[in-house]
Amino acid sequence: MATGKDLPQDVGTFIRDLRQTAKISLRQLADRAGVSNPYLSQIERGLRKPSAEVLQQLASALRVSTPAMYLRAGLLDGEGQQGVIAAIAVDPDLTIAQKQSLTQIYETFRNENARQAADDAAAAADAGATVPDPATGEVEVPDEDAAIKAELLKTQTTSTQPEEKP
């Protein structure tokens, strides 16, 4: 059984290792998977990130399970639970163009939500409000005594300064 240290670092390396183990050329794999030779080369070198549909085609051409390929590409979690992108990719009722569109829309929504959460947290921190940590859901409670002391210190500093006479 392969351990985490034994596994390649990215999906491109994983695909190249599988291809070399199967003793087939890059061109042969590209033909079997229905992708262009240059595109497959870019995937193997880590220059391109393949879609779930292309991963499915490569898995079939390499005779490995699609979930194994999705796992390596980060489309499945460690327990094998399918993510939204993987579910879109295997839906037989969608065309390739529809799958690509849905995947792009989904990723856009996720990126926008992450960006909005970061903006909300920054705005709340600037305003001194407490917001839940997105990762843990915990709320950091500010030290009220420290806040009161800071306010008193600020008040004392301004009241002890001599007033200017006109």
Image (cartoon, helix red, strand yellow):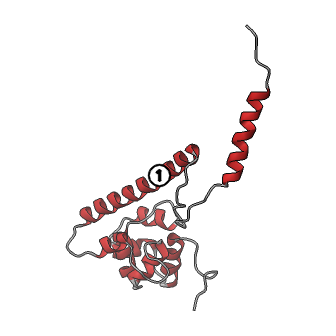
For the C terminus, the image quarter is: top right
Residue at 39% from the left image edge and 85% from the top image edge: 63
Location of residue 15 in the rendering, given as x and y in whole percent from the top left corner: 48, 75
* Left or right: 68 in relation to 145: left
Residue 116 x %, y % = 45, 51
Reading the image, the residue beneath label 1 is: 115
Which of the two residues, 132 or 90, is positioned nearer the viewer here?
132
Q: Is residue 154 left or right of residue 22?
A: right
Indicate the amino acid at tag 1.
Arg
Drawn side of residue 39 relative to residue 14, left or right = left
Foreground residue, 99 or 157? 157
Residue 72 position (above or below residue 128): below
Q: Residue 10, how many percent across, how many down?
A: 54, 71
Q: Quadrant of the N terminus?
A: bottom right
Q: Residue furthest left?
A: 93
Which of the 4 image quarters holds residue 143? bottom right
From this view, report whether residue 47 is shown above or below residue 53.
Answer: above
Residue at 72 percent across and 40 percent down: it is 152
Q: Quadrant of residue 130?
A: bottom right
Q: Residue shown at 37%/64% (left/top)?
A: 36
Q: What residue sits 76% from the left and 10% below the top?
A: 165
* Viewer-nearest residue: 59 or 39: 59
Where does residue 98 sit, x and y in percent of width and height? 24, 63
Relative to 67, say whether 114 is above or below. above
Label 1 Cα crowd, 10 Å radius (few <14 / some 14-19 / many 20+): few
